[in-house]
Image (cartoon, grey):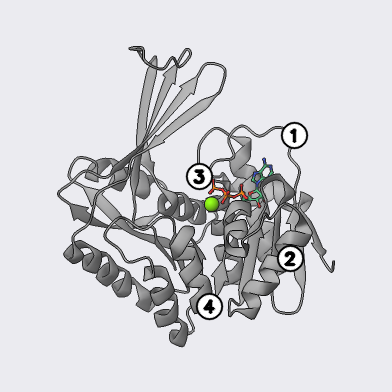
Amino acid sequence: MITVAGFNTAIDRLYTLDALEPGVVQRASAVQAYPGGKGVHVAQTIAALGEPVQLVGLTDAFHRNLIARRMSERGVLFHGVEIAEELRHCLALRERGGRMTEVLDPGPLLRPRTCERLLDTLWRCVEDTAAMVLSGSLPRGFEADTYAALGRQVAPRGLPCLVDASGDALRLAADAGAFLLKPNRDEAGQLAGRPVDTLEDAAIVARALHARGTAFPVVTLGTLGALGFDGSDCWHASLAIAHSANAVGSGDCFLAGLAVELTRSGELGRALRLGVACGAANALHEETGYVERAQVEALLPQVKLVRFDR
Ligand SMILES: Nc1ncnc2c1ncn2[C@@H]1O[C@H](COP(=O)(O)OP(=O)(O)OP(=O)(O)O)[C@@H](O)[C@H]1O
Ligand SMILES: [Mg+2]
């Protein structure tokens, strides 16, 4: 069983409009609402790949049924901690031409008791867990070092902990040393204090993160694929696709593939291959943060995996 801590559950609302005009009242031709947030993306992708998975995250009275239904349809065991306030909403406005405008709300400010309940629920899941994934922004009310502390606490149990965070949460997890960190190009640039544009730049960041105590640092580079360092070799995996429909959430699907293959074989190179196939599979269709297993399996043999020794 893989356990995902994706505390900051969102409700994604997708509005379809002809063309967005600021300052004008407009009517949407369609509105869809579904559970979102990085934890949901990672967990539902792990389930799609055929691995048992549970997700710990926030829920609220208005969306309790929507979230429970979707997670159960997708094969995710969801442990929701209910709050009295509403979950955060992420608004996506899609114009006929395909352009998207997103408005993200800051989300609820949690009381200390709610933060404790989320962490207690997570600890109750640890017993039957083969790997833990800590994914996405922490809800307001959590300390920025929460992921760093969790990684330190589970390490003595031999439980691999994969972290996808940004800003202070990422920096503190890197300072503490993690099992695996997955910054994207921008996040890696923030860590390094200079832009990360090329594979060479990414390899420098990965090696530096390893020297600071992260066993498996992985940098994702969008269409350039991903680069990881396992302590002896740097690996680069990539796959070009003809047309990207929506690459938002590719990092979440990539991380799900990484977690699944690291649980199965423990080999970083193989894990990068599956991650890259999942990231590309997500980009091929409209839905954010989800893949079809058959599509991933069709893409997998096309992923190019090479040792990167520059
Ligand atoms: N357009 C694309 N074509 C092919 N593969 C892609 C594309 N975009 C992303 N990927 C794959 O998905 C992986 C993760 O993508 P990216 O680096 O954009 O992550 P991210 O910025 O963390 O994404 P998000 O935070 O939106 O989930 C990449 O390393 C790559 O393998
Ligand atoms: Mg990301």
Tell me the quarter of the image containing the C terminus. bottom right
State which mark lies toward you, 2 or 1.
2
- For numbered disc 1, what is the local secondary structure? loop
- Of the numbered discs 3 and 4, the one sitting upstream in the chain is 4
Please tell me how crowded label 3 is: few (under 14), some (14-19), or many (20+) other residues with Cα within 10 Å.
many
Badge nearest the viewer, 3 or 4: 4
The disc, 1 or 4, on the residue closer to the chain's N-terminal end is 4
Amino acid type, callout 4: Gly
Q: Which residue is mark 4?
A: 177
Measure the C-alpha gap from mark 2 to mark 3.
Answer: 26 Å
Which structural element holds mark 3? loop
Q: Is residue 266 visible?
A: no
Are the residues flagged by discs 1 and 3 in contact, CB closer than 8 Å? Answer: no
Marks 2,1: beta carbons within 8 A: no
Residue hosting label 1: 242
Q: Is mark 3 within 8 Å of ligand 1?
A: yes
Residue nearest the observer in this picture, 225 or 49: 225
Q: Residues within 10 Å of mark 1 (few under 14, many from 20)?
A: few
- Mark 4 lies on a secondary structure that is loop
Pointer 2 residue: 203
Confirm or deny contact between disc 3 and disc 4 (CB under 8 A).
no
